[in-house]
Image: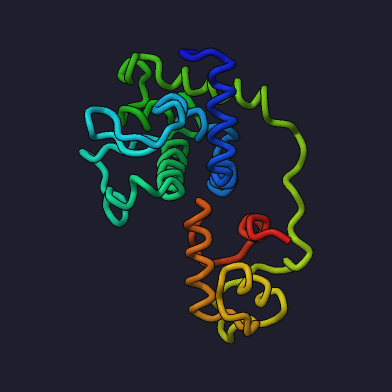
Amino acid sequence: MNISESDLSAEYQRANAKWPFIHQTELARGLPRMLLFAVGSRETNLVNELGDGGHGHGVWQLDDRFHTPPGGFAQFDTNVPLQCSIAADMLHGHLATEAGNVVRAANRYNSGQPETALTAGGDYGPDVVERMQTLQRLFVDDRPPPPVPAWFTRDLGIASPFMHGSDVGVVQKKTGADPDGVFGPITRDRVVNFQTHHGLTADGIVGPITARVLGP
């Protein structure tokens, strides 16, 4: 691991305090716990910056020679939740391609190829996994995720006829929609905005993960 345990711990604690949605994004995308932090640590020491000769953007260094994010890089460079969401989607896809092999998936994230020898420094995937496992050992426990809020009793989204009820009203109040208790297109748009801002899957559906982030 090309970083001391104490420095890695400090990076994680700083980033987690500043960007608490990273863990939620890992959970929402089904990623191994701490993988996003490990990749961000390897790429930028978990700092939002322009690197790689001006071609690497953000905490997870999206390369502008191969990728164009929604809204362009002017918006992307200041939007860490969007950076996190795109990095998570890429890692999720690489993990699917590599049947869950984290080393090979991380290698693909770095170089587009699964072989470690072709990555930056010739050690990218193993280094990321060692960082991930170190953070898991230091900070992850075996407690189950927190319970969903008491108001959440069903998935909420656009339906025909529109869903309605006090739970819809709660979602509307928490997302800034008119609290009329009817889940219509405006409420869906507000939910999508909330999910995007918090690095969740922006599908406009209030399921257990979105409900937990919305809070009691």
Q: Where is residue 183 in the image (x, y as percent from the top left)?
A: 58, 79
- Residue nearer the viewer, 88 or 4: 4
9 sits left or right of 199 in the view: right
- Residue nearer the viewer, 173 or 24: 173
Where does the C terminus fall, quadrant-wise?
A: bottom right
| Colour option used | rainbow
Residue drawn at (37%, 26%) of the image: 114
Quadrant in the picture for residue 137: top right
142 sits left or right of 174 in the view: right
152 sits left or right of 26 in the view: right
Q: Position of residue 151 (x, y in %)?
A: 75, 68
Residue drawn at (50%, 28%) of the image: 38
- Residue nearer the viewer, 119 or 19: 19
Q: Where is residue 61 in the image (x, y as percent from the top left)?
A: 34, 35
Residue drawn at (64%, 26%) of the image: 136
| Number of residue marks | 0
Residue drawn at (64%, 60%) of the image: 214
- Residue nearer the viewer, 149 or 154: 149
Q: Position of residue 49 (x, y in %)?
A: 35, 35
Residue 30, placed above or below residue 13:
below
